[in-house]
Amino acid sequence: MKNLDLLKQQKAEFAAKMKEAVQNNDEQAFAEAFVEFANAVQEAVIAEAKGLVQATDAQILIGRGVRVLTSKETEYYQKLIEAMKSPNPQQALSNMNLVLPETVINTVFDDLTEEHPLLSRIRFDNAGALIKWIFSTMDSRFLAWWGPLCGEIKKQLAAQFQVLNLEQTKLSAFVPICKAMLDLGPAWIDRYIRTILAEAIANGAENGIINGRGVAEGAGDPDDRIYEPIGMTRDLLQFDPVTGFAPKQPVPVANFAPKAYGELVAQLAVSNNGLYRPVNNLLLIVNPVDYLTKVMPATIYQRPDGTWARDILPLPTDIVQSAWVDPGIAILGLGKRYIMALGTGKDGRIEYSDDYRFLEDERVYLIKLYGTGRPMDNNSFLVLDISDLEPTIPRVIVDNIQDSP
């Protein structure tokens, strides 16, 4: 019997299939990979629900990951189930006056940060129904200064802030729901939708956070336009209206010795305007295969008792694996200086879709989250070339040697 715990072991396989589909620009392959994952989640949830059909104790359900819903959440899911069961679900959903409760989105974000370490290391905000998100590009210590009583404060303050337009880009996730799911009730529908949303957002967001090209015109055809966040690997100072922000030039790294690592981190300690800033929340993001074959051998040593200490770097650094990082490179940066804001947009409704006709005995519903993301400045992240990264070589010091008689 499948359950959601066993399903976690399959996430890497599904992520790899989706990444390959994105790289090949194959929408059909991506859709099929995502449906395969959604069907596996459905089977797990249905099996789990049947196993707990006699359980009414809230603590038992909570222990199995089934949330106790708020009154607004219960009302929303009940009306959603009624709309999905209706003869004309598209019309029923359009007449449904309720929107996805913000508490559901907040819980999805909590699930994201627990299951996907990269998203817990950046500044990930729920923008609700906002369409613009204002953030400071400077460290707080630079926001106040001494000056004339009637000095031009507004002009100087305005230069410290930027605006993210959440309406420019969106994450769309389709949710295939079989008829058996509709009979499980609001709590189990909630668990299924949260699981699907979390994985859809995680894969879409991680790809955008790492590789996003920004918003660009493309080759001229409206279908070629680019609507993506600005990734950590992109150069904010080099923008092409056709291809978006250019990739950063990778910095070759031979080892992570203190001097070499310190010189890399020192580049992060200087902001775009030349002011110094404290270095904290250091983040090193690598491909899982590169972690095992390059980064792990370069950051491990054996203690005198024979045990191994791994992920050891000269400065405190979180090493995070992501399937969306290309082989041969790594990203070093200040995690909290990447901002990603997502919300439900102005309506936040689930929409009915006829786009995926290959599904049988299932109805497909579309959830749209508006948002975008970008580094706060161009010096927040470095792209490293780790193709020639050397493994750690133990240093042995022999002391108190005496000549033989």
Image: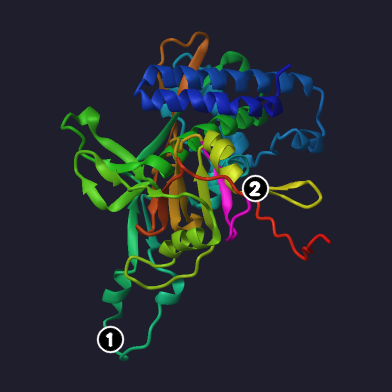
Q: Residue at x 45, y 62 (%)?
A: 263
Give the side of residue 148 with respect to residue 396, left or right.
Answer: left
Q: Residue at point 62% right, 35% down?
A: 74
Q: Quadrant of the N terminus?
A: top right
Q: What residue sits right under mark 2 in the picture?
A: 300
Query: Please, is residue 305 above or below residue 85 in the view?
Result: below
Q: Residue furthest left?
A: 220
Residue 220 or 232: which is nearer the viewer?
A: 232
Picture quadrant of residue 317: bottom right
Which corner quadrant holds the C terminus?
bottom right
Instruction: Report the span colored magenta.
Output: 310-322
Residue at the front extreme? Answer: 405
Question: Where in the figure is residue 115, as x and y percent of width and height?
Answer: 61, 39
Pick the residue in front: 221 or 209: 209
Residue 241 lies in the magenta stretch: no
Residue 130 position in % (x across, y down): 40, 51
Residue at screen point 50% across, 34% down: 323
The tag on residue 151 is 1
Identify residue type, mark 2: Ile
SS of the residue under disc 1: loop
